[in-house]
Image: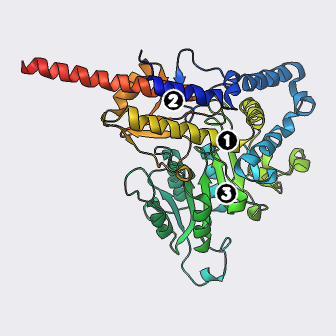
Amino acid sequence: MSSPSPEPSRRAAALDQADPLARFRAEFFLPSGQIYLDGNSLGPLSRRAEAHVQRVLGEWRALGINGWTDAVPPWITLSETVAAQVAPLIGATPDEVAVTGSTTTNLHQLLATLFDPCGSVLARDSRDQGRSPRNVIVADELNFSSDLHALHSHLRQRGLDPARHLRLIKSRDGRTLHPADIRAAFTPDVQLAVLPAVQFVSGQLLDLAAITREAHAAGVLIGWDCSHSIGAVPHTLDHAAADFAFWCHYKYLNAGPGAVGGLYLNRRHLGRAPGLAGWWGVRPDRRFALVAQHEPAPDASALHIGTPHLLSVAPLLGSLEIIAEAGGVAALRAKSLALTSFLMELADRELAGLGFTVANPRADAERGGHVALAHPEAWRICQALKAAGVVPDFRRPDIIRLAPAPLYNSFADCADAIARLQTIVRTAAHEKFSTQRALVT
């Protein structure tokens, strides 16, 4: 197996030696003999996440139903406990956050609560009076397919044709969105927009605050899919005045496969009846009254539907403990930027002439937590990388995603991964050349 050349290895060692987050690597169960660079798809298990799951299982074993009140913390308030710890990661107050459901079900809930195709309830000012209803949703063609599935199905349930009432912002290069194209999409017939904070393929980080201002100036409500940014990029949703957001916790927050999701509802929308009502969204003091009329909680917890999934909430407690000890998301972002900068620098130098292009934006303010390398043979290269002990991620048509996570990846991981990638492609090119030469001779 190829090793990185001496100079990148020396630099990586020096950077790792000075890294204040290096000690957290030991908190994680990393696949033996592998360089794990796929945390933007599924983060690895941490020892603390495992401990919290074992604790809840032990409480269930020992307490049975009394765990709802006698566990520590009590199960009945566990979602609120976790929501208060998640809130600083997105720049919100705890009453605006609900830890519940999954990414797509939370999007469905937010659409059911906020999308107003009649254009009357949520009109921002008198500009909408006398105009045709705002009954269009704006999204983008690069967004994760599950969001688009939810938008299509929601419009159909409202009796609206997605072909007319869902407008997708086009990409000029197939990888990123241009700010002017986003602004142009906020036309007078648009009531609501859903955009990703970070594009899941290219890693483009959108200017959430600026785009939110532009949406509001056009009278449009706007929400953000933060699945590929939470835990890697600091957000200030309150300061930006975003209307809503939703996300998963199993990527950079390492809460496990299918972990509980999260949502944010700006406080100016608190008090609205949830579009999808369920008993766990009832005021806590009335939840067990079990009356037929829904009495929603006064905060974002009104958007809960069913009983919290405690065994998928528990791992998140461990992850949040580690993040707090590491100095919060700002500390994670600083190392993430350093790791991805180092990775791009090595890609530029070590992979020169081998057909690679750095496909993510390079500016710190324009990229999320992963590096996207484009190559015509990306699929085959990803399979070879896995065989060589590097765990990447492939995205159609030609992207290799490498996500060095600040809590458990090192600069040495980046240097080793690029060295193995270089060896794979050079070996393949040499074998192809030798085969062609043999055929000619």
Residue 414 badge:
2
Pointers 3 and 2 in contact (CB under 8 A)? Answer: no
Q: CA distance from mark 3 to mark 2?
A: 35 Å
Q: CA distance from mark 3 to mark 1?
A: 14 Å
Above or below — where is 27 with respect to 270?
above
Q: The residue under label 3 is which amino acid type?
A: Phe
Residue 141 x, y percent position in the rendering: 44, 54
Above or below — where is 369 with respect to 166?
above
Q: Is 352 positioned to the left or the right of 245 in the image?
A: left
Q: Nearer the viewer, residue 42 or 355?
A: 355
First in sequence, mark 3 or 2: give its number.
3
Q: Secondary structure at mark 1?
A: loop
Q: Nearer the viewer, residue 66 or 46?
A: 46
Q: Secondary structure at mark 3?
A: strand
Residue drawn at (19%, 23%) of the image:
433
Q: What quarter of the picture does the C terminus occupy?
A: top left
Residue drawn at (85%, 34%) of the image:
75
Residue 102 in sight in this render: no
Q: How is the image coloured?
A: rainbow
Residue 261 badge:
1
Q: CA distance from mark 1 to mark 2?
A: 30 Å
Q: Secondary structure at mark 2?
A: helix
Residue 197 x, y percent position in the rendering: 57, 52
Q: The residue under label 2 is which amino acid type?
A: Cys
Pointers 1 and 2 in contact (CB under 8 A)? Answer: no
Above or below — where is 349 with respect to 196?
above
**Occupied quadrant, residue 74:** top right
Residue 244 badge:
3
Residue 53 x, y percent position in the rendering: 76, 24
Residue drawn at (48%, 48%) of the image:
362
Q: The residue under label 1 is which amino acid type?
A: Gly
First in sequence, mark 1 or 2: give its number.
1
